[in-house]
């Protein structure tokens, strides 16, 4: 498997970890039965859970774009140092982004977002 596809799989695993952490925090706050039910009348999420909800949405949006360019590059047979770098930048930037987002550290979070976006863009450009 190419490095780019490996980074895609690792990114999907990271997304799963983020979802599981968020779900675990929800269960800890509300209890398993409340989370397994309709969830219509749950209390307001904690600040950390709100951050992780936003992080989940952000990761989902970015993972879709990353998957598209990686799969398109793979289908076109494009794999080189630039696409490997782009995929690696995306994955490692998303790890850093998740940590920074969860802890609520301001100003540095957009930097990691843009590093990941740059990774997507350079893969796309190499594919075209």
Image (cartoon, rainbow, N blue to C red):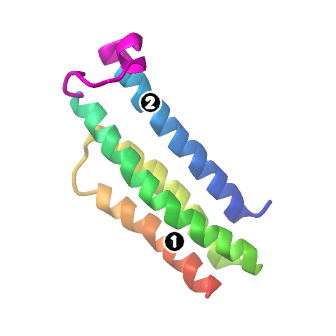
- Find out whether residue 34 is within the magenta segment: yes
- Find out whether residue 61 is within the magenta segment: no
- Vertical order, 29 against 121 (above or below): above
Residue count near mark 1 (Cα–Cα under 10 Å), binned few <14, some 14–19, many ≥20: many
Q: Which mark is residue 4?
A: none
Residue 71 location (% of width, % of height): 67, 68
On the image, which quarter does residue 3 sit in?
Answer: bottom right
Q: Residue furthest right?
A: 1
Q: Which residues are magenta?
A: 27-45
User: SS class of the residue under badge 1?
Assistant: helix
Residue 78 visible here = no
- Identify the residue at image location x=25%, y=42%: 104
Q: Is residue 38 left or right of residue 79?
A: left
Comes first in the chain, label 2 or label 1 = 2
- Vertical order, 10 against 123 (above or below): above
Q: Is residue 86 left or right of residue 30?
A: right
- Identify the residue at image location x=74%, y=75%: 75
Residue 85 location (% of width, % of height): 61, 70
Q: Is residue 47 left or right of residue 11?
A: left
- Identify the residue at image location x=40%, y=45%: 56
Residue 38 visible here = yes
Asked if the residue at tag 1 contacts the one at tag 2, i.e. Cβ–Cβ closer than 8 Å, the answer is: no
Q: Which mark is residue 120?
A: 1
Mark 2 sits on what residue? 21
Q: CA distance from mark 2 to mark 1?
A: 26 Å
Residue 94 location (% of width, % of height): 46, 54
């Amino acid at each position: 498997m190419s490095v780019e596809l490996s980074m895609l799989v690792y990114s999907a695993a990271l997304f799963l970890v983020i979802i599981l952490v968020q779900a675990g925090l929800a269960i800890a706050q509300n209890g398993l039965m409340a989370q397994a039910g309709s969830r219509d009348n749950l209390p307001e999420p904690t600040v950390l859970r709100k951050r992780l909800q936003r992080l989940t949405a952000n990761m989902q949006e970015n993972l879709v774009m990353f998957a598209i360019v990686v799969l398109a590059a793979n289908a076109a047979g494009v794999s080189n140092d630039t696409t490997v770098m782009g995929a690696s930048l995306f994955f490692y930037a998303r790890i850093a982004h998740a940590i920074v987002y969860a802890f609520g550290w301001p100003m540095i979070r957009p930097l990691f977002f843009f590093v990941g976006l740059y990774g997507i863009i350079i893969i796309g450009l190499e594919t075209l």
